[in-house]
Structures are given as structure tokens and as C-alpha cells.
Amino acid sequence: MKKIILFGIILSLLLPAISIGERRYSEQELLCNIVEDLGGECREMDGIFNGVILKRFIQEEEMTTIAEDIKSRLGIIGEEIDPFIVYEKLPERYYEKEIIFDEDFSQITYRGYDVFKNSIAMIISSYFDRETMEGETYLCINIVKDSDFLKNNDIIEIITEVFKSYDNPVEVSTNIIGEISGSHDYNYMKKRLYKTLKKYRGDIIEEYTDISLLSITAYTPFIEDYFKINENRINLNLAIRYNEYDDTMYILVGTPIITNGY
């Protein structure tokens, strides 16, 4: 329970703010453009949508009703399968459902696919704090697309509408994974990355480099939302790493930060 609540708190700290007026890209469009400007090919998009939907604790009956409604709105299809059967990758014709109902904590998790083969995971968790006699209910939705990144994006609009229907803001983190076949000189890739950041008026906030990894956090006015650390605005995170086992250079680009491990 504590880990789930902490996860929600961490993401809730990434509060959006209004930035200066510029041409606005959709997050997916800008991140894909950056990958392509670096010579890569976009392979996977990962989006996390997180927020409080109710400022109270809910129990089994109400949570089940809400979960089923959101599952239907997200278009998760297929037959329910035992969540304790371990798959390397869940078959597209099935979905998993896990439930936890305790005195002060409730949670329902769905994992499955929609008709466009988007991988969707949704978690509704609710807790009650007996010290403050208050509770909250969180919703976290994770969507993974491995094709048509800028098409068939109705699911993203649907997710946004789900949160709007509860009259609460949603925090969004978007990641794109790109690939370049073969090994490339890191100094060359760094110069190319600097050039790409300049194209989008990116200000570098922090940079880390070792023999196998290049990682940069930055701010660009071409993305509307950002968060602050020590007065620095941040809304863009880039990482480049070479994997010698499959002879591939991976490009990870995220806003406001990369949430996938790299």
C-alpha cells in the first residue's frame, strides 16, 4: 500500500505550469521528431496518466462500479485470465484483473489491450488514513503503443476525458523509445543532440556522460508543461545508450522525465 501511495505522490509532484507562448507540439509529435532528428526510428511509446479522482476512500462495491466503467471506456477487450499465470507477454485476446479489498485500502488493476493493440494497464487505489480520518482515490493509467504513434490516438483523448469527468487534474509522463542499428561515436551523437536541442530552443539543465551512457535533462518552450527543481524548469529528458548484445543504440526521450529504466 505504501509503495502505491508513494508512487502517486511522486508523480503528483510533477505539477504542470504555464510556460511562455510558443508553437505547441503534441508530446508524441515532439518526442518522435527528436528521435528522428538523431537518426533513430521510433519503436515504442509509453504514456503514464496519474491523478486523484476522488478525495475520499471508496470500498468494494463503488470501486468495482468505477473500475468497470473506466475499463469499458478504455475499450479493454478479450477474456479475463488468471493473473497468477505468468506470461512473458500477455496474449492480446486476454486481460488480467487483480483485486485487493482491505479495511482501509482497496485496489483494482486491469491489464490488457484495446482493438488497436495498445497495451493498457489501469490501477485504481483508494486508502483511508485513520489519523486524519481522511481518504483519497487514485487512478493511474499506463498505455504502450508500438506502432502508429501519431495515429489512432483516440485512446489518449479518452484517458484525458476520464480524468476530466472526475473534475481533477491529470499528471502526464510520455516516453518514446527509438533505435539506431549499430554502434555510433558518443561524441558525434552528443554534437547531434546539441544541434537537435538548439532546434527546439532547449536549455540544458543537467548532463551526465560515461563510456556507455549520455543523459540530459532540459527545458524547451515548445512543450507547455514543466516542473521546477531549484528554480530550474524541466520538461525534457533524453538518454542514449548502446547495447552491444543486440548491436543497437537506444534513444529514450521523455517529458517531463524518462520514467522507463535506462
Image: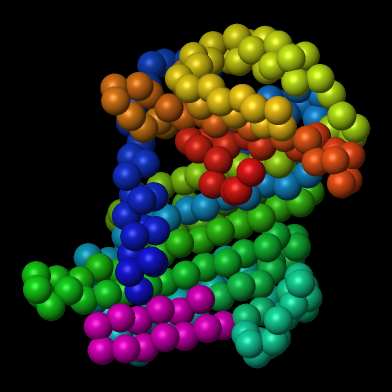
Query: What quarter of the picture does the C terminus occupy?
Result: top right
- Farthest residue, direction left: 132
Residue drawn 76% across and 70% down? 89
In the image, is residue 105 part of the stretch drawn in magenta? yes
Give how far across and how far down residue 120 sits, in percent.
62, 64
- Farthest residue, direction front: 211
Pick the residue in front: 226 or 115: 226
The main secondary structure of the magenta stretch is strand
Q: Horizontal placement of 231 versus 199: left or right? A: left
Q: Please report the bounds of the magenta region as a residue range.
A: 97-109
Q: Is residue 208 above or below residue 118?
A: above
Residue drawn 53% across and 22% down? 207
Asked if residue 154 shows in the view, the reply is no
Q: Horizontal placement of 13 versus 120: left or right? A: left
Residue drawn 30% across and 81% down? 105
Give how far across and how far down residue 46 sits, in percent.
63, 50
Query: What quarter of the picture does the N terminus occupy?
Result: bottom left
Quadrant in which residue 248 is drawn: top right
Quadrant in which residue 63 is drawn: bottom left
Give how far across and how far down residue 54 sits, in percent.
27, 66
Quadrant in which residue 229 is drawn: top left
Q: Is residue 24 above or below residue 1?
A: above
Residue drawn 80% across and 41% down? 243
Q: Is residue 54 above or below residue 163?
A: below
Q: Horizontal placement of 185 versus 132: left or right? A: right
Give how far across and how far down residue 123 sits, in percent.
47, 70
